[in-house]
Image (spheres, rainbow, N blue to C red):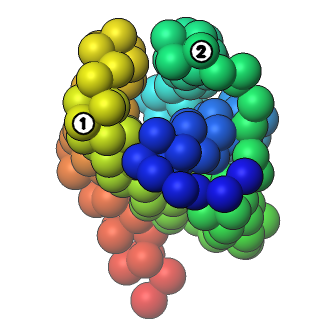
């Protein structure tokens, strides 16, 4: 599909983020299983439920602009998930793996925050008010998830990972 105007670009990016969210629906259970911290595991499981809602919300955005919700493979998310998968396969101390999982998850969140912010800006420019509302709701949830991950890392997991490192010396 040629990108001749902002509406085409908006539609194309919606297809990309739909793919990203669907990829996350498949990746989050694996991340939850790899987490040793019960709190981190619960956070991934909670975000899985949220991500399923994000997919549904995106489908509503497509309908609001009279477009068919059809994903286009998101290469960026493929790369982020692949990087996270490699971290999960590493032989590492549980707290170190949890710290790595948080880092991988935050990279995903930051990608999503940037994407949703851009989509909201374009939707406003195009006068897609319903899309703005739906996308804004998802953006706020992504920001909250990022804050929760930061809090979990700073309150316990990073300290545990640092201690694991000093125990080996």
Q: Do the residues labelled 1 and 2 touch (CB within 8 Å)?
A: no
Q: Residue 153 at what x, y percent from top left?
A: 31, 50
Instruction: Give me the residue at 35% from left, 10% from top.
Output: 130
> In the rendered picture of this protein, how many numbered marks are placed on residues?
2
> Residue reaching furthest front?
4
Q: From what the image shows, is residue 51 above or below residue 108?
A: above
| SS state under label 2 | loop
Residue identified by numbered label 2: 66
> Residue reaching furthest bottom?
169
Q: From what the image shows, is residue 62 above or below residue 123?
A: above
Q: Which of 95 and 61 is in front in this view?
A: 61
Q: Is residue 144 left or right of residue 81?
A: left
**Disc on res. 125:** 1
Distance between the alpha carbons at the discs numbered 1 and 2: 17 Å
Instruction: Give me the residue at 74% from left, 37% from top.
Output: 71
Q: Is residue 70 left or right of residue 81?
A: right
- Residue 85 found in image quarter: bottom right
The answer to whether residue 121 is visible is yes
Instruction: Give me the residue at 46% from left, 40% from top.
Output: 7
Q: Which of 67 and 132 is in front in this view?
A: 67
């Amino acid at each position: 599909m040629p990108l001749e105007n902002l509406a085409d670009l908006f539609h194309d990016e919606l297809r990309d983020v739909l793919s990203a969210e669907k990829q996350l629906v498949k990746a989050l259970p694996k991340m939850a299983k790899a987490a040793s911290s019960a709190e981190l595991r619960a956070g991934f499981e909670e975000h899985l439920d949220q991500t399923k809602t994000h997919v549904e919300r995106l489908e509503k955005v497509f309908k609001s602009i009279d477009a068919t919700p059809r994903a286009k493979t998101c290469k960026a998310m493929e790369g982020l998930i692949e990087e996270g998968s490699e971290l999960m396969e590493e032989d590492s101390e549980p707290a170190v793996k949890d710290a790595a999982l948080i880092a991988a998850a935050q990279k995903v969140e930051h990608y999503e925050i940037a994407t949703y912010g851009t989509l909201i800006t374009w939707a406003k420019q195009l006068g897609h008010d319903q899309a703005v509302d739906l996308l804004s709701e998802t953006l706020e949830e992504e920001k909250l998830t990022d804050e929760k991950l930061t809090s979990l890392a700073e309150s316990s997991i990073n300290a545990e990972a640092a201690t694991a490192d000093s125990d080996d010396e």
